[in-house]
Image (cartoon, rainbow, N blue to C red):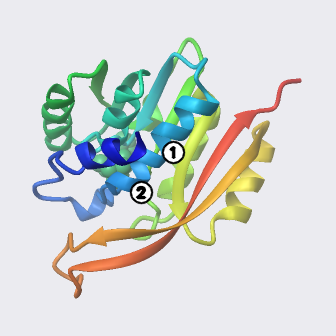
């Protein structure tokens, strides 16, 4: 299941001209498949997932293929056009909205999946996403650069969430920007699952 999902996701289109300012790095297929399959097991009762900063939609499509209803949100129209194309190819129940995640307001909490900007070029870029995830989510899957665990745990606790799972990965990143020297680079990342603490 995970393997065939990853193989399909590998065929999706990526950012054509990634925008450095927005830290557009796609999630690798294997990691997207891992998250979606895990969510389909642990969070099967969840109906809707929001993909915050969905980019070209790999996480949205992966979650859609696992049977969730998904709404992908991104500020970048060019990325969303590719995401729409990818979701049509996969024939999944995914809608896309062009919006800065900071201005998102929901009536009802939903599941959240996200690979936000890590905040390397723009400080605290991932803080904005975490804040929104705690405000609108009940369950959150989120990818961060290695070394984020303390920060994420503290922020979760402060916002009434608890970290239930932490996965450490080496994420193979393709050469995306001209300043990358190698074709592939392994970036250590941490993936968190968090849930609301019921009072
Ligand atoms: N989630 C995608 C893309 C990750 S790159 C994937 O897993 O492949 C981070 C994405 O966040 C980019 O597509 C970028 O356009 C988007 N982004 C950055 N700042 C944003 C903001 N304030 N609001 C919405 N999207 C934003």
Seen from the viewer's position, the closer of residues 198 and 159 is: 198
Q: Is residue 68 above or below residue 107?
A: below
10 Å neighbourhood of mark 2: few (<14), some, or many (≥20)? many
Seen as rendered, the residue at the extreme bottom is 181
**Circle 2 sits on which residue?**
117
Q: Residue at x 28, y 61 (%)?
A: 21
The answer to which of 55 and 90 lies nearer the viewer is 90
Count of numbered circles on the image: 2
Q: Position of residue 84 (x, y in %)?
A: 17, 30
Residue furthest to the right: 199
**Label 1 vs label 2: CA separation?**
8 Å
Ligand 1 lies under 8 Å from the Cβ of mark 1: yes
Q: State whether residue 173 is above or below residue 90.
A: below
x and y percent of residue 41 in the render? 59, 31
Q: Residues within 10 Å of mark 1 (few under 14, many from 20)?
A: many
> Secondary structure under badge 1?
helix
Q: Quadrant of residue 68?
A: top left
State which tag comes first along the sequence, 1 or 2: 2
Query: Residue at image x 40%, y 47%?
Result: 32
Classify mark 2: helix, strand or loop: loop
At 31% from the left edge and 38% from the top edge, which residue is drawn?
74
Work out whether residue 145 or residue 126 is closer to the camera in this orientation and state it. Answer: 145
Which residue in the protein does label 1 denote? 129
Q: Quadrant of the C terminus?
A: top right
Above/below status of 142 relative to 84: below
Query: Which of the image's four quarters has the N terminus?
Result: top left
Marker disc for residue 171: none
Residue at 32% x, 48% y: name it: 6
Ligand 1: does it lie within 8 Å of the C-beta at label 2? yes
Viewer-closest of 105 and 152: 152
| 57 horizontally vs 186: left or right | left
Asked if the residue at tag 2 contacts the one at tag 1, i.e. Cβ–Cβ closer than 8 Å, the answer is: yes
């Amino acid at each position: 299941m995970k393997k065939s999902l990853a193989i399909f996701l590998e065929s999706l289109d990526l950012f054509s001209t990634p925008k450095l300012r927005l830290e557009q790095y796609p999630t690798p297929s294997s990691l997207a498949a891992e998250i979606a399959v895990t969510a389909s097991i642990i969070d099967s009762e969840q109906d809707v997932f929001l993909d915050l900063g969905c980019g070209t939609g790999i996480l949205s499509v992966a979650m859609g293929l696992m049977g969730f209803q998904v709404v992908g949100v991104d500020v970048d129209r060019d990325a969303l056009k590719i995401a729409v194309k990818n979701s049509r190819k996969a024939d999944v129940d995914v809608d896309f909205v062009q919006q800065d995640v900071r201005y998102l307001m929901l009536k009802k909490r939903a599941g959240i999946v996200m690979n936000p900007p890590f905040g390397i070029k723009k400080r605290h870029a991932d803080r904005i996403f975490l804040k929104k995830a705690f405000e609108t989510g009940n369950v959150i899957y989120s990818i961060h650069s290695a070394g984020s665990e303390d920060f994420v745990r503290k922020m979760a606790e402060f916002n009434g969430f608890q970290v239930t799972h932490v996965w450490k990965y080496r994420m193979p990143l393709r050469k995306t920007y001209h300043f990358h020297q190698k074709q592939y680079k392994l970036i250590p990342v941490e993936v968190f699952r968090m849930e609301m603490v019921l009072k």
